[in-house]
Image (cartoon, helix red, strand yellow):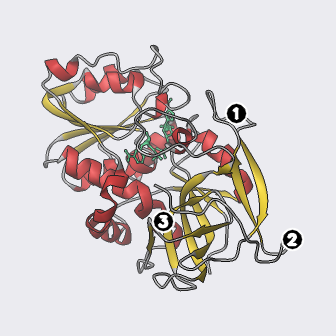
Amino acid sequence: MEAARKTTPEPRDGGSGDNQMRYWRLDKRPRVEIEDDCLSLQTTPIPVLAEGEVLMRVIYLSLDATNRLWMEEIENMYMPAVPLNTPMQGFVLAEVAESRNPAFKPGQIAMGLGHWASHVVTDGAGWMALDRPEGVPLDLAFGVLAIAGPTAWFGMMEIGRPKPGDTVVVSAAAGAAGSCAAQIARLKGCRVIGIAGGADKCAWLKDEAKLDAVIDYKAENVAEALTRIAPDGIDILYENVGGDIMDASLANMKLGGTVVVCGLISTYNGAMGGDAGTGPKLFHNVILKRLRIQGFVVLDFMDRYGEAWAELIPWLRSGELKFRLDVADGLDKAVDALRSMYRSGNSGKLMVKIGEER
Ligand SMILES: NC(=O)c1ccc[n+]([C@@H]2O[C@H](COP(=O)([O-])OP(=O)(O)OC[C@H]3O[C@@H](n4cnc5c(N)ncnc54)[C@H](OP(=O)(O)O)[C@@H]3O)[C@@H](O)[C@H]2O)c1
C-alpha cells in the first residue's frame, strides 16, 4: 500500500525556506524498542503539485501498535516495510490544502495512509473524504472511525459472532481497539470480562465502559481470575496481547469457543521473529477445546467500513459507546508517544495533534 509521495522533486518556493513541511524520517530499523537513532525530524520544502495530486495539511496522526512493525522487515507482513530514509508512515486525518485532483476539494476533511508529517502530498489512492458526523467531535470521530472502531467491529462481528449471553474476554481492554471490542460485545448482550493493566484502567472499564468484570493483570493471576469469574468457560476470546495473557484465556476457553486474533502487542518489540520466550505456549488448547481461531487485518475491510460506522456512529452519539482519547501535542512528540504504548503508557486511543481544526 502506498498512498503518499515520498520524494519532493520540485519545491514550490525554489528552496527559499518558505512553505516548509516537517516529517519524521525512518533512518534505521529498530532492533528491540524503537531506539533513539531510528527516526529523525526533518524539514523540507513543500513541493509543487503534479496533475492528480493533493496537498493534505495534517490535523491528527493516529499512532497504532502496528506502526512499530512497519519499521521492520517482517516476513509475510501485510504491507511492505517503510523504506529507510523515507517519511514514517501512519494514518492521518487532514484538511485538503490544495488539490489538482477532482476527487478532493480544498477545505474538505479526509483520512488515509500518510506520513508522520505536517503535510502529505498524495495522489489520493487509499484516502477517503470524511463527512463530519453530526454530534461527534472530529478528534473522537477520527479516533474511533479510522482504525479502532472498524477493527473491533469486524473482528467481533465477522469473526467472533457474539450471541446474547456469551461470555466474552477482551485483552488490552482499556485500549483503543480493545475498549471498542469489549463494548460492542456488551451492546450485543454478552457478558464481558476485560483484562487491562492498572487500577485506573480497570476502574474506567467497570464504571464507564460498563463491563461485567475486569482483571488487572498487573495485580492478579489472570488464569486464576478467569477460572473464578468464568467458571463455565469463555465463548469468545478477542485477543490483543498474546504471550502469557493469551495462554491464560486459552486454558479457560469453552469447548467449541472462538478466538479472534486481533493483535499480539506483547511480541512487537523485537519478538515477532519467534523468540522462544513469548507465547502462546498453551496452544494445544485449540485442539483439546475444538476452538475456531482466526486472525484478520482491518485493512482488508476498508471497502466495508460503512457497515461498521452504521452501528458505531449512533452508539457514539447516544453515549452508549465510551471512548478515551490520549492526544500528544505536536509532531515532535510522536516517537515518545508511540514508545509509551508498549509500556502501557497510553490510556485510550493514542493520537498526535499536528495541526489545528478549522
Ligand atoms: N488486526 C488488525 O487489523 C488490528 C488493527 C488495529 C489494532 N490491532 C491490534 O490491537 C491491539 C491494540 O492496539 P491499539 O492500537 O488499539 O492500542 P491500545 O490498545 O490503545 O494500546 C496498547 C495497549 O496494549 C497493552 N500492552 C502493551 N504492551 C503490553 C504487554 N507487553 N503485555 C500486556 N499488555 C500490553 C497496554 O495496555 P495495558 O495498560 O492494559 O497493559 C497498552 O496501553 C494491538 O495488538 C494491535 O496490533 C490490530
Which of the 4 image quadrants contains residue 247?
top left
Could you tell me which residue is drawn at 22 percent across and 52 percent down?
157
Disc 1 vs disc 3: which is toward the camera?
1
Disc 2 vs disc 3: which is toward the camera?
2
Q: Nearer the viewer, residue 291 or 53?
A: 53
Q: Position of residue 223 (x, y in %)?
A: 32, 21
Could you tell me which residue is drawn at 60 percent across and 63 percent down?
5
Q: Where is residue 19 in the image (x, y as percent from the top left)?
A: 78, 75
Could you tell me which residue is drawn at 70 percent across and 33 percent down?
35
Q: Which mark is residue 17?
A: 2
Q: What residue type is labelled 2?
A: Gly
Which of the 4 image quadrants contains residue 306?
bottom left
Q: Where is residue 171 in the image (x, y as percent from the top left)?
A: 38, 36
* Sequence order check, earlier mark of 1 and 3: 1
Q: Total of numbered circles in the picture?
A: 3
Which residue is tagged 3? 142
Q: From the viewer's perspective, tell me whether residue 239 is left or right of residue 218.
A: left
Q: Quadrant of the N terminus?
A: bottom left
**Above or below for 222 versus 143:** above
Which residue is tagged 1? 35
Q: Which amino acid does label 1 sit on?
A: Glu
Q: Position of residue 334 (x, y in %)?
A: 67, 51
Q: What residue type is labelled 3?
A: Phe
